[in-house]
Image (cartoon, rainbow, N blue to C red):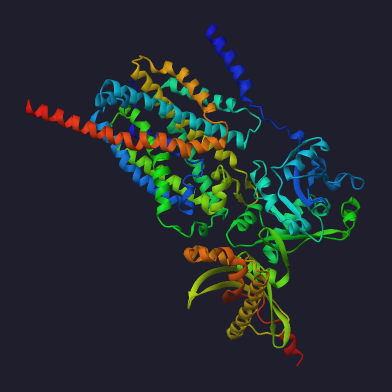
Amino acid sequence: MKRKGVFLLLMMTVTILLTSCWSKKELTDLAIVSAMGIDETKDGRFHITLQIINPGNVAGGMQGGGGGQSPPITIYSASGDNIVEASRRASDRISRRLYYAHTNLVVVGEKLARKEGLNTLIDGLDRDPEFRNTSTLVIAKNSTAADLVKTLTPVDKIPANKVLKTLEFTERKWGENVKTSLQEVMKSIESPGRGAVVSGFRLVGNPQQAQKLDNLQESAPGATLRASGIAVLKQGKLVDWLYGKPARGTVWILNKIQGTDINIDWAGKKEAIAYQTVRQKTSVSAQVKNGKLHISVHTRVEGDISEMEAPVDITNPKVITKIEQSLRKEIKKELRIAIERAQKNKTDILGFGEVVHRTRPNQFKKLKTEWNDVYFPKLDVDITVEAYVRRAGLRNKSFLSGVKENQK
Amino acid sequence: MEKAKISASQLFILMVLFELGSALLVPLAIDAKQDAWLAILLGMVCSFILLLVYHKLYTYYPDLLPTEYMQRILGKVLGTVLAFVYILYFMYDASRVLRDFGEMLLTFAYPDTPLFIANALLMLVIIYTIRKGIEVIARSGELLFIFMYVLAVGGFILIISSGLIEIKNLQPILEEGLFPVLKVVFTQTLYFPFTEVIVFTMIFPYLNNPKKAKVTMLCASGLSGINLIITMLINVSVLGVDLTERSQYPLLSTIESIQVANFLERLDVFFMLALIITIFFKICVLFYAAVVGTASLFKLKSPSRLSYPLGLIILFLSITIASNLQEHNYEGLKVAMFTIHIPLLGIIPPLLLLVAFFKNRKKHEENTFN
């Protein structure tokens, strides 16, 4: 009996120990950081801006009070000689412990990216066990990271989410932007003879206006955030911005295009037929021809016709073949523009060096050190495109061809 | 020796868990860059030769512990000294693995907890298990083995389905030729983790079907080898060589990268669970071997009584062997490898076999002569 009592006592003491609350973090003591902006101060130190979620205001939503609410996020900022110092220093203005496990977005100011580069930032973020290197990295175009992080956004109340979702959807539907995680950027900066691409984001409108709740009271907010271009990094430093065709061509060669829209001319009319891609596959390979390195880019794309602004009769397969041919030309042109731009920048963002490294390691060893500046810009690149039209929506002939026939 | 019996399948499970142990945790064979998997494969194949040596020694003395047959082979004094050295090795290895466990826990999840507390909590459980004997260890192994594989297969499917694998990262194969790979094989993978199973020679006498020992041993090494190869292939193809090389715990980073459909993410807890299971068994087996060996060497009747003192030694050793993680890793890969692993696992057993072979032949001849 006595033994049983001792045993019971032991069990109870052990239970207290088993709650293991040594490194406990109470939810009410955490400040959940949703986004972090990194800028440079005038004297060359780091300035971080932290976007912290106000839990009550996110859950309650707009139905609750209407006007006069507090915003869903609060901004704190601090500076320091490195990111860890700045983050620790920020604790003198926040009543809670900064919690980085849910930081999905890191914004780097354009000035910092251009002058200092990303290389010095990465280690601190990558090393921290709490911070995830799957979080998305974005460069703030034309503004400081602070302005971008401070902006309030409609629909998605947490601005970090708005940025992430925008990148995700535009990458899937339009393809002029990429969503790049810290890990991906790190890998491509590290890879021998390779430049990196990072998504760009821009604040449109007045930064002062953007931080106010009033901004959200309008149906067309005066200040908004939008994905804007692709930043080209050479050795971690921003050297160029890509927009439009070069941007899309780059994404295409990186085999990241999911869906986009390509227009071709038809019967003298500019951009008459819109073609939407459904799936594509791009592969890059390296050969040696006459002792010279040679890169071949091959892409195969399938998709549908989604709009025809000219009277086209696609019931005839020959017409489809013709459309496919002009599509090939159009896509080839776009890829060519992207490659030429990269060569002009002397930055191998397309990963050609990696292909050479993989398939011809011995040869690449000699080229490695001067790949970006000497060999890459002079590279011969072959582009072959296979484009297929598979379907054309609910109708066959264009509406315009009906109009044309009946009005004769 | 306690009066216990384990079956061949239990031995198999213990061996697999043992070899996965801390080898899953570290960037194994990463000195061979993207050919790490090849180094593990070759290490496994080469280890089979040494495993057969260990097994041959066992067939000469099927009922004796290595600590006992060393005395038969080398004579009383030299044999006792050597047996003692092996016991020390088992304890040192156990404390290294315990340290690995503590460092993993502290680095990843409990930065504010002292190392001693983390290690002591695991060690208490292990001491308790050791007191219960080898049969209990083997049975709990069976139970947790299934759990471990459910985790592993689940993780594998998630990594594949989140599209993280880039086979490109594994190319070019043999960039610097075969030499760097062989160097890694003979200075690392052959010993850690494959021939570390020498500790199982302390457990073979408990086997209820001694004939199956050889097959079981080779199969277990094969399975764990394949698992380690797959793990390293996935690590390198997800993270790339440079990041894997820089990672303290590459498998953790790989699992952290999983993001399926925007909600299946941050699965690192499962990594911890799997690692705690395998590390638990690795320490258990090493510790058990040390306990049984000490008991037989000093002719103690109940080995389980030794579990508290020896357990405390391992616990304190695990704290004092290094002042930081880097020193700990350096010792493991550079110092202990050449001064402890290679002589004790690669050189002494074949020599023992040679002596045993001549001794037994002589005995055999005498027998036939009479």
Q: Nearer the viewer, residue A20 or A58?
A: A20
Q: Nearer the viewer, residue A136 or A141?
A: A141
Q: Nearer the viewer, residue B61 or A227?
A: B61
Residue drawn 30% across and 28% down?
A: B208
The answer to whether residue A129 is above or below residue A312 is above
Q: Position of residue B163 (x, y in %)?
A: 56, 56
The answer to whether residue A389 is above or below residue B269 is below
> In this image, A99 relative to B272: left or right?
right
Q: Nearer the viewer, residue A66 or A360?
A: A360
Viewer can see residue A318: yes
The answer to whether residue A272 is above or below residue A63 is below
Q: Quadrant of the C terminus of chain A?
A: bottom right
Judged from this view, the residue extending furthest toward the left is: B370
> In this image, B102 relative to B134: left or right?
right
Q: Position of residue B169 (x, y in %)?
A: 52, 57
Judged from this view, the residue extending furthest toward the bottom is: A408
Tally of numbered discs: 0
The answer to which image quadrant residue A89 occupies is top right
Q: Position of residue B228 (x, y in %)?
A: 45, 45
Q: Position of residue A112 (x, y in %)?
A: 76, 55
The answer to whether residue B178 is above or below residue B116 is below
Viewer can see residue B203: no
The answer to which image quadrant residue B117 occupies is top right
Residue drawn 33% across and 15% down?
A: B299
> In this image, A213 relative to B330: left or right?
right
